[in-house]
Image (cartoon, rainbow, N blue to C red):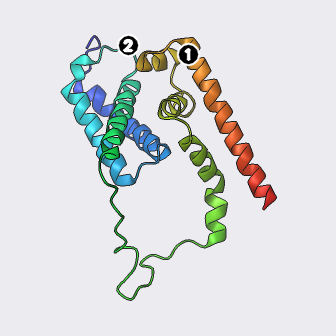
Amino acid sequence: MSRNFHQSEIEKQIPEINKRLHASGRLLGLSLPDIEDLISKTWVTFFENMDNFRGESKLSTYITGIYFNMNRQRKRKSYSQPIAVEDFDDTFDDMGFWSKPPLQPQSYVESLEVQGQIEDCIQKLNDKSKEIFLMKYVFGEDTKEICNNFGISVTNLGVMLFRAKNSLRKCLESKAEESVGH
């Protein structure tokens, strides 16, 4: 590691990096337990291999790259395992009523409709495009750092971002047409 990070420097950045990783997990469609598990595993991996960090990118970019790589590994493993059915025991009380009633439909729709549509459209991007889009436009990462992290050229990055934005635009336009048509 060419940058000699002191533990206190890393500790100062952990809360902000954790926020970034949590937001990434939500946009990747992960459940809260999966997000927390993946964040923990990401930090363990970083600390076990921190000598490999050469300082060519920001610490947050490097750790986000580890997070995305670990998520891809997790997905590959999950394809070979049967899908577990969620346990709904905590959703209802002993009498069969909601343990926590859902929000009123109108307030729920008003507060989440646009965010949900954007997240849905982001979910439709392929994994690499999704990760690059998030790093560039959600986290404001530098082009050079993204290229280093993914091992791609600036030209390739530009093409991937153009395609991702175009896909998102088409998806959101389609959703807008659907809502006007109904």
148 relative to 35, above or below: above
Residue type highlighted by circle 2: Glu
Task: Name the foreground residue: 169 vs 16.
Answer: 169
- Mark 2 or mark 1, which has the lower sequence index? 2
10 relative to 56, above or below: below
Which mark's residue is nearer the viewer, 2 or 1? 1
Task: Name the foreground residue: 133 vs 2.
Answer: 133
- Where's the N terminus, which quadrant? top left
List x then y, in percent, for residue 107: 64, 67
- Where's the C terminus, which quadrant? bottom right
List x then y, in percent, for residue 126: 52, 35
Q: Residue furthest left?
A: 48
List x then y, in percent, for residue 96: 41, 85
Residue 156's label in the rendered image is 1
Residue type highlighted by circle 1: Asn
Is residue 66 found left or right of 119 in the rendered image? left
Is residue 178 found left or right of 88 in the rendered image? right
Is residue 88 found left or right of 139 in the rendered image? left
User: Gap between marks 2 and 1, in whole Å?
Assistant: 19 Å
Mark 1 surroundings: few (<14), some (14-19) or many (≥20) residues within 10 A:
few
Mark 2 surroundings: few (<14), some (14-19) or many (≥20) residues within 10 A:
some
Q: Tell me the residue at 59%/52% (across/down).
A: 116
Task: Name the foreground residue: 86 vs 52.
Answer: 86
Q: Tell me the residue at 71%/39% (across/down).
A: 170
List x then y, in percent, for residue 24: 45, 40
Task: Name the foreground residue: 20 vs 4.
Answer: 20
Q: Secondary structure at mark 1?
A: helix
Q: Secondary structure at mark 2?
A: loop
Residue 56's label in the rendered image is 2
Is residue 132 found left or right of 60 in the rendered image? right
